[in-house]
């Protein structure tokens, strides 16, 4: 997580590397890590809807949520059923957007 000198005007930038028993996952070799980075970096404007207060806290919370989806979706933990459609698209990515009205995760 990188913060610029003019944070919170400029949003934080996130680069992920996930270590697991099966190896290292980065945006270069794992489409789901790329999708999580996109959620945290490209769609950051949604975290600024209520103002710049607590943006870093919101980013870390969103990262935790994305990691929960990743761990469950990749079968690394017991299934809780966070989402209806597990994978979507040619990249087979997990849903990282939470629909609070319907209380499940969905794809963009």
Image: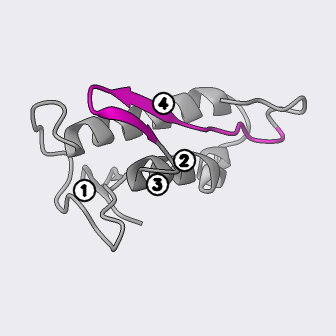
Magenta region, residue range: 9-25
Packing grade of label 4 (10 A; few <14, some 14-19, many >=20) is few
Using residue 104 as the reference point, say whether residue 75 is left or right of it.
Answer: left
Packing grade of label 1 (10 A; few <14, some 14-19, many >=20) is few
2 or 46, which lies in front? 2
Question: Residue tagged by mark 4?
Answer: 61
Residues tagged 2 and 3 counted as in contact (Cβ below 8 A): yes
Question: Residue tagged by mark 3?
Answer: 35
> Which label sits in the foreground, 2 or 4?
2
Toward the right, the furthest residue is: 5
4 or 17, which lies in front? 17
Q: Residue 80 in the image: x percent, y percent?
A: 12, 38
Distance from Cα at disc 2 to Cα at disc 1: 24 Å
Using residue 59 as the reference point, say whether residue 97 is left or right of it.
Answer: left
Distance from Cα at disc 4 to Cα at disc 3: 16 Å
Residues tagged 1 and 4 counted as in contact (Cβ below 8 A): no
Is 11 within the magenta? yes
Label ID, residue 102: 1
Q: Residue 60 in the image: x percent, y percent?
A: 53, 29
Quadrant (top left, top right, bottom left, bottom right) of the C terminus = bottom left
Q: Is residue 94 above or below residue 51?
A: below
Is label 4 in a helix, a strand or a loop?
helix
Of the numbered discs 2 and 4, the one sitting upstream in the chain is 2
Q: Residue 71 in the image: x percent, y percent?
A: 27, 35
Packing grade of label 2 (10 A; few <14, some 14-19, many >=20) is many
Residues tagged 3 and 1 counted as in contact (Cβ below 8 A): no
73 or 43, which lies in front? 73
């Amino acid at each position: 997580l990188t913060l610029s000198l003019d944070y919170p005007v400029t949003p934080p930038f996130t680069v992920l590397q996930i270590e697991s028993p099966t190896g290292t996952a980065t945006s270069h070799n794992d489409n789901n890590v790329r999708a999580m980075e996109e959620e945290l970096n490209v769609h950051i404007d949604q975290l600024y809807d209520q103002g710049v207060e607590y943006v870093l806290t919101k980013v870390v919370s969103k990262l935790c949520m994305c990691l929960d989806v990743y761990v469950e979706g990749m079968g690394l933990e017991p299934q809780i059923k966070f989402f209806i459609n597990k994978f979507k698209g040619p990249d087979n990515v997990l849903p990282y957007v939470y629909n609070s009205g319907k209380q499940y995760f969905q794809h963009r």
